[in-house]
Image (cartoon, rainbow, N blue to C red):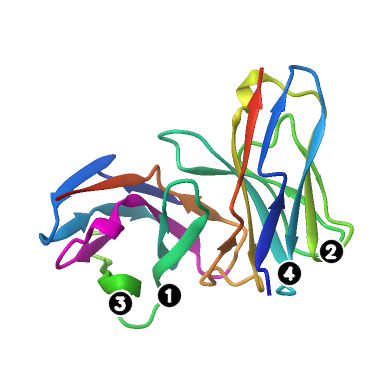
């Protein structure tokens, strides 16, 4: 069985400071892992994904995430937050061999203080 | 190339009324999904389809029906709406069946059941 836990429901940082959004997963299979971003009243957009190649994955807008199998984690980071990063972020786990089993985390709302 | 579109954007129903939500994609994708998004719960899968003429139940299928008569369209029906179905509904699609593929999301339909 698969599951995903986003450890913080809300994270608030000052503009220009680092961002860390935490995600832990559980999977019986080799997983694919994703981070999606949702801006207010919009659909979801892919930030980045891990599918078994490099464990450090770079995404759009300066975000990156590292797949750590030993810690079953896939935390999202950004060195310097921008006001436009304010949004809801979802960590997602999928069984790599099948697109029928996709599990979403409950989301982390990122707020940016001026 | 419009991607994934959803109709309508917003709807208000009275308890017991019925309606159909339409999802359309122009990317020739095989897999399509219907999710509902509720505060603090992430996205939960209602139904999905792995190809034209096929549908399958997701995590929360009760009270919903779906049809995929054409590859590009995936319809979500509510036969007798209940207040518990007040939510934001998202449609998504994937090109094939591999779990590492990116999901493309529509902009969402906001449904209020009174």
Same chain assignment for discs 1 and 4: no
What is the quadrant of residue A69 in the picture? bottom left
Is B4 or B58 nearer to us in this picture?
B4
Contact (CB < 8 A) between labels 3 and 1? no
Which residue appears at 50% of the width and 34% of the height? B38
Q: Nearer the viewer, residue B75 or B61?
A: B75
Which of the two marks, 2 or 1, is nearer to us in this view? 2
* In-front residue for pair B8/B50: B8
Same chain, labels 2 and 4: yes
Q: Secondary structure at mark 4?
A: loop
Q: Residues within 10 Å of mark 3 (few under 14, many from 20)?
A: some
Which residue bears the numbered disc 2?
A: B52
Q: What secondary structure is found at the residue carrying circle 1?
A: loop
Q: Judge the density around disc 2: few (<14), some (14-19), many (≥20) Cα neighbours within 10 Å.
A: some
Q: Which residue is mark 3?
A: A58
The residue to which callout 4 is attached is B30
Instruction: Determine contact: label 3, label 4, CB under 8 Å.
Output: no
Q: Which residue is mark 1?
A: A51
Of tags 1 and 4, the one toward the viewer is: 4
Residue A100 coordinates in the image, percent (x, y): 62, 58
Can residue A32 be seen here? The reply is: no
Q: Which segment is the magenta one?
A: A72-97
């Amino acid at each position: 069985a698969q599951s995903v836990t986003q450890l913080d429901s809300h994270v608030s940082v000052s503009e220009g400071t680092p961002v860390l959004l935490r995600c832990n997963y559980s999977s019986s299979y080799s997983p694919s892992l994703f981070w999606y971003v949702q801006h207010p009243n919009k659909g979801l957009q892919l930030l980045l994904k891990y599918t078994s190649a490099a464990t450090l994955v770079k995404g759009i807008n300066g975000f990156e995430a590292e797949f750590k199998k030993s810690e079953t984690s896939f935390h999202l980071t950004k060195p310097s937050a921008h006001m436009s990063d304010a949004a809801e972020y979802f960590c997602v786990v999928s069984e790599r061999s099948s697109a029928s089993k996709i599990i979403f985390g409950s989301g982390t709302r990122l707020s940016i203080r001026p | 190339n419009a991607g994934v579109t959803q109709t309508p954007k917003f709807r208000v129903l009275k308890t017991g009324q019925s309606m159909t939500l339409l999802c359309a994609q122009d990317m020739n994708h095989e897999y399509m999904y219907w999710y509902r998004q509720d505060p603090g719960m992430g996205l939960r899968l209602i139904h999905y389809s792995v190809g034209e003429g096929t549908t399958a139940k997701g995590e929360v299928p009760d009270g919903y029906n779906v049809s995929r008569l054409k590859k590009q369209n995936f319809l979500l029906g509510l036969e007798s709406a209940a207040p518990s179905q007040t939510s934001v509904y998202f449609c998504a699609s994937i090109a094939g069946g591999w779990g590492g593929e990116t999901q493309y999301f529509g902009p969402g339909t906001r449904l209020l059941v009174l």
